[in-house]
Each structure stands twice: as structure tokens, then as C-alpha cells.
Amino acid sequence: MVEPTSIPDDPALLKPLVRELFAELRKSQRREESLQAKVDELARKLFGRKTEKLDPNQLALIDFEALGLEAPTPAEPEKDEVPTKPRRRAKRKRPSKELPRRRVEHPLPDEERICPCCDEVMPAIREEIHEQIDYKPASFEVIENVTFVYGCRKGCDEKIVSSTKPPQMVEKGLPGPGLLAHVVVSKYCDHIPLHRMEGILRRQGVEIPKTTLCGWVKECSERVEGLLGALKKELFHSAVVATDDTTVPVQKKGGAYSGRLWVYLGDLDHPLVLYDYSPTREGEAPRTFLESYGGYLQADAYSGYDQLFKPDRSPRIQEVGCWMHARRYFYEASLKDKGLPLEALAMIRELFRFEKAAKDFSPDQRLALRREKAVPVLDAMKTWMEKHRHTVLPKSPLGKALTYVTN
């Protein structure tokens, strides 16, 4: 950096210095814009609206004819006075007929049913039923598994036979299958920590330390390994598997770290949902899980999946992108720029419109609609992206969106 006191007076020496300063200024401005975009994105996530719905009025800024798209129906102009609708009260749902029912009658005593005209006791002419849902606390029972030893009454010692109890999930353990199911569901579905479960059970008269509960959970996880393998094998019969990952806080000594939970969904003929855990987001986790799968994999553009899509891989996995992920990048860019990002959102909106129309279609009908309607939109979008990809800054929000979708 040249000090102000040492600036040369010769114009020939000043020109390269000015060019260098302009280059530094542009670099600084790009860095500032990038940082400001990150600050705005964080502020939106913390304080802004969560929906990514596109304002129909913004579509008026787009030249649909130039994009080869059909212009949507214009929104009706807002009236000066919009009558407010009265707020509807939530309609109470009747209790399920599958719930057990107990009839409790509340009759009047005879002295309160005397007719003032004839002094006779009035009989009931109709009944009115008022339903109420009540809660009965969970109950525990001790199951005594009794086995028998059989021997000859004549005193023979050579032949003695014994009956056996059914196989247990925890060998020689205290819990029955219902209690184990309750502990596992409470921990993994209701997210109740085992130390809280210990207190809940104590209030119901059962003393089980959290260390014992932890051992039961470990035993259950080891026992279902075979079931997990069978479910995974059934999942891999799917023509299409969808996957995504999310963070999960994991406790460790002195704090916590963010682990990763990967979800894998089967197709309509194999409606399975399997989860896999990894301590990091390295691509080794999905590559290991999907090692023996061959078919279509729908996922985001995370680079950790790239090894799965190599042409020489056996069995072959075909990549299927997710338009919701792609749309999010253009939506983020549209918050800064109302030009090109809106054009991309309009084209993606057309794709979603066709999918909504095909909601109740058969697979063959949906495929025909996509070939007729969606392919021209995709071709137009590809041409549009090739036209604008090299005209925007790669690190800008729109540049990141174009790079993401192209990849």
C-alpha cells in the first residue's frame, strides 16, 4: 500500500497505481457485498418470514413471451375497503369411536322429579349425552413366567424334562416387551431423556435407574440390527430413493457438537423410511449406506454424492435433482435483485404448476404430461442459464444459484 506522502507526481507512474487502487476497491466492494448478503440472510432467517411464496404482483415485471412461457392470469386489483371476515371458531372434533367408552348416568332423585300437577314421579322421556375425554394413567403389572420341571413319579432319575419361558429381548432382564417399547418410543419419538424417564416411572411407583434404562436401549438397538438389514434390503428394491440430511445436537464431555442424521425414503411400492447417523457430513456416510443400491437417487447437489454418480460405478445410480433446493437459491437472490432471479422463479413456478395438475394422475399420465409441458420449460431454462451464467459474478447470490443448478 502506497503512503499518501509518497505518491509520485509523474502521470506515467500514477496510472498503474490508480489501476491497482481501483482493483483493490472493486475487490473490497465485492467482499463487502458478500458479507452484507450473509448478514441479510441470517437476519431473514432469525426475524423474517419463513415462507418462500412468490408475490403474484412481481410476475408483472417479467417478459413471459421472451422466455417462451404463458403469462399467468393477472391478479385482481385490491379494493379500497376489504370487508373483514368474522373469525371462525375451531370446530370441535368428536372423540374417536374406537376409544373405549364408559357410560355414567346422572339421574335426578325422586323428590326432584315430582310433577307439580299430579304429584307423580316423572319418568325420563329422552336422554342427552355429553362426551368427555378422560385420561387414565399408564399401569404396570408384574408378569410371573412360571416354568415346570417334569419327572417320573416312580422315582426314576434318568428322565427329567423342563419347560422354557419365551425368548426375551433382554436375557435374564426385568423388562417385558411393552415396557421396552414404551422406553424406546419415549426416547426417540417423544424425545424424553432417560433421566426424565426415570422420574416419570418413579412417580408411577416403579424404580428403574437411568443406567439400567440406558442398558435396555443398547440391548434393543443390538437386537434390531437384523431387522434394519431386512428393511434396508427392501428399501433398495425401490426404483427411486430420496435422501437428505439434517443436523442433530450430540452431547459430549464439555459441550455438544452437530452430528448428521440422514433419511432415506422408498418409492410408492416400498414406502419405507430409514435413518442413518454420522458424526460429520462427510460423503462417506451416504456412500457406505448406498453401496449396494442401483436405481435413481433424488438428493440435493451436495458434492458428497458425486462418487455415487460415476458412470463406471456398479450398480449404477442415476442422479435426480431437487427443484425445491434449486428454487431456494433463486429465491434468496430475488430478495436482492428483482430482475433475472424472478425469471428463473417464474420458470420453476411453471414446473410446479404442472406437477400440481398431475397430483391425481397415474404414473404414465404424469410422464406424458412432463414430456409435453415440462421438457419445453426445461429447455428454455437451460438456454436462459447458458445466456446469463457468465454475465454475473460467480460469488453473487445469483451466480451461486446458477452454479448450483448447472452442477
Image (cartoon, rainbow, N blue to C red):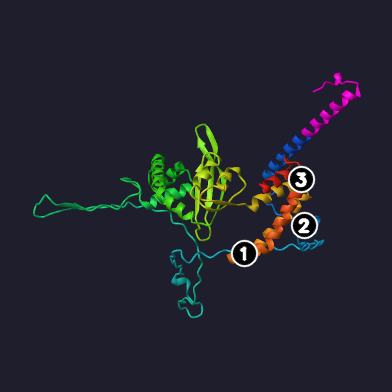
Between discs 1 and 3, the one toward the N terminus: 3
Report, in whole angstroms, how far the alpha carbon at label 1 lies from the one at label 3.
Answer: 35 Å
Residue 15 is a magenta residue: yes
Report, in whole angstroms, how far the alpha carbon at label 2 lies from the one at label 3.
Answer: 21 Å
Furthest-front residue in this view: 312
Q: Residue at x 51, y 57 (%)?
A: 238
Identify residue type, mark 1. Answer: Arg
Q: Which label was assigned to residue 366?
A: 1
Furthest-bottom residue in this view: 118
Numbered range of the magenta stretch: 1-27
Q: Which label was assigned to residue 67?
A: 2
Identify residue type, mark 3. Answer: Lys
Identify residue type, mark 2. Answer: Leu
Q: Residues within 10 Å of mark 1 (few under 14, many from 20)?
A: some
Between discs 2 and 3, the one toward the N terminus: 2
Q: Is residue 4 visible?
A: yes
Please name whichever residue, 157 or 17, is drawn nearer the observer in this view of the structure: 17
Residue under label 3: 336
Residue 131's place in the image compared with 275, above or below, is below
Secondary structure at badge 2 equals helix
Residue 29's place in the image compared with 338, above or below, is above
Q: Residues within 10 Å of mark 2 (few under 14, many from 20)?
A: some
